[in-house]
Image: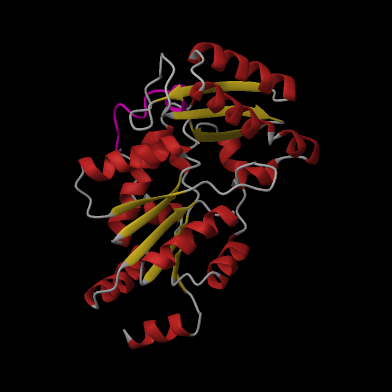
C-alpha cells in the first residue's frame, strides 16, 4: 500500500493493461477501507468525462478510469474503425485530473475467449436506441458488467447524456445484485448548448455550427410539454425543426417516462425527451428533463 499511496501523492498514475494488475491494486485499496470510484470510458476524453472524474474524486478516496473502445457495442464496422483513439492524450488528461489508475486493456484481455456470454436487459432497452441500434445495449451491458467485476469499485459514475444507457445500467446492477452505487452526473455542455461528446471531434466545422440546434429544439419541446401540448404534435414539429436546421436524418425524438423510457401519450410536467439524429455522417444523441 505504501508504494501505491506514494504514487497518488505525487500525482503519478498507475497504468494497468491487465485484469490482474487492476484487481491487485484495487484489492489493496479496499483492504485499507478506501472507497473506489470508477469512470468507464471509450477514450477520446473531453470535459464531460473529466467532470465525472471530478465527481468521483469528491466522493471517493481513489479513482479508476477505464479506456477501452468496446467492439461489441458497435453496429457498423466503419463506425468502430473511425472512432477516435488518442490514447496518449487520454492518459495525460487522466494524470492531470488526479486519476489514480487508468485501465487500458486490449480486446483480447476483455474478450479472451470471444463473446459467447452476453448480458441482456429487458424493458428499458427496447425503445429509442434499441430500435435503431439492435444489439448495441447488449454490448454495453456485457462490457460494463465485466468491468464492474474486474475493477470491484464501490461507486461508478455515468453521465446523463447517455440517458437510456444510464437507466439500463441502473437496472442491470440492481437485477444482478452487483454491489456498486451508480452515481448519475449532469450533462456537460459547450457554451452554445451542444453536449460534449467524443463524436463531436468527427464533425466538420460547417456541421459543428448546426449541431447546437438539437439542444434548442429539445428545450423548446420541453417547454411545450410543460404548457400541456400534445406529445405527438411536439415530436412531429421537433423533427421538422431539426431537418430545417440542417440535420440529414432524425432517427427519433421521444417523449417518455424518466425511468421506464416508455413513450408518454399525454401532456406531463415530468419525464424525459430523448433524441438521435445524423449530421454530416455523425450520429448525435441528447436528452433533457421535461421539468427543466
**Is residue 39 located in the magenta-colored stretch of the structure?**
no
Q: Position of residue 281 (x, y in %)?
A: 68, 31
Q: How many marks?
A: 0
Image quadrant where residue 22 sits: bottom left
Tell me the chief SS of the magenta region: loop
Q: Position of residue 134 (x, y in %)?
A: 43, 26
Pick out the residue farthest to the left. 177
Image quadrant where residue 179 sits: bottom left
Pick out the residue farthest to the front. 227
User: In terms of depth relative to the viewer, which is nearer, 142 or 77?
Assistant: 142
Q: Position of residue 200 (x, y in %)?
A: 66, 43
At 67% from the left edge and 23% from the top edge, which residue is drawn? 242
Image quadrant where residue 8 sits: bottom left
Q: Split into 4 quadrants, where in the image is the N terminus?
A: bottom left
Q: Position of residue 220 (x, y in %)?
A: 60, 27
Q: Is residue 155 above or below residue 254?
A: below
As drawn, is 48 to the left or to the right of 194? Answer: left
At 74% from the left edge and 33% from the top edge, which residue is drawn? 210
Say whether residue 255 is visible: yes
User: In terms of depth relative to the viewer, which is nearer, 266 or 105?
Assistant: 266
At 36% from the left edge and 35% from the top edge, which residue is drawn? 138
Q: Is residue 37 above or below residue 217?
A: below
As drawn, is 116 to the left or to the right of 213? Answer: left
At 50% from the left edge and 49% from the top edge, which residue is drawn? 69
As drawn, is 230 to the left or to the right of 92? Answer: left
Q: How is the image coloured?
A: secondary structure
| First to last magenta residue range | 119-131
Q: Is residue 144 above or below residue 276?
A: below
Say whether residue 83 is visible: no
Amino acid at each position: 500500500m505504501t508504494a501505491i499511496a506514494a504514487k497518488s501523492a505525487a500525482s503519478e498514475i498507475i497504468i494497468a493493461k491487465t485484469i490482474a494488475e487492476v484487481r491487485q491494486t484495487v484489492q489493496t485499496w479496499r483492504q485499507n477501507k478506501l472507497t473506489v470510484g470508477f469512470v468507464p470510458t471509450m477514450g477520446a476524453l473531453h470535459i464531460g468525462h473529466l467532470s465525472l472524474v471530478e465527481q468521483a474524486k469528491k466522493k471517493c478516496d481513489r479513482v479508476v478510469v477505464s479506456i477501452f473502445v468496446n467492439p461489441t457495442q458497435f453496429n457498423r464496422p466503419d463506425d468502430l474503425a473511425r472512432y477516435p483513439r488518442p490514447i496518449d492524450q487520454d492518459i495525460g488528461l487522466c494524470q492531470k485530473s488526479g486519476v489514480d489508475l487508468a485501465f487500458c486493456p486490449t480486446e483480447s484481455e476483455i474478450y479472451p475467449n470471444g463473446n459467447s456470454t452476453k448480458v441482456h436487459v429487458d424493458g428499458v432497452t427496447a425503445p429509442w436506441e434499441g430500435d435503431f441500434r439492435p444489439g448495441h445495449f447488449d454490448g454495453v451491458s456485457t462490457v460494463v458488467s465485466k468491468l464492474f467485476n474486474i475493477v470491484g469499485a464501490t461507486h461508478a459514475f455515468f453521465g446523463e447524456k447517455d440517458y437510456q444507457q444510464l437507466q439500463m445500467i441502473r437496472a442491470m446492477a440492481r437485477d444482478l445484485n452487483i454491489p456498486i452505487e451508480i452515481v448519475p452526473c449532469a450533462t456537460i455542455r459547450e457554451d452554445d448548448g451542444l453536449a460534449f461528446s467524443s463524436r463531436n471531434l468527427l464533425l466538420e466545422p460547417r456541421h459543428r455550427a448546426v449541431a447546437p440546434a438539437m439542444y434548442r429544439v429539445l428545450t423548446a419541446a420541453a417547454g411545450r410539454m410543460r404548457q400541456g401540448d400534445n406529445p405527438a404534435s411536439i415530436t412531429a414539429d421537433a423533427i421538422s425543426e431539426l431537418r430545417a436546421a440542417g440535420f440529414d436524418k432524425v432517427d427519433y425524438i421521444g417523449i417518455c417516462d424518466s425511468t421506464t423510457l416508455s413513450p408518454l401519450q399525454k401532456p406531463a410536467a415530468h419525464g424525459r425527451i430523448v433524441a438521435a439524429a445524423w449530421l454530416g455522417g455523425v450520429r448525435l444523441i441528447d436528452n433533457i428533463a421535461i421539468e427543466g
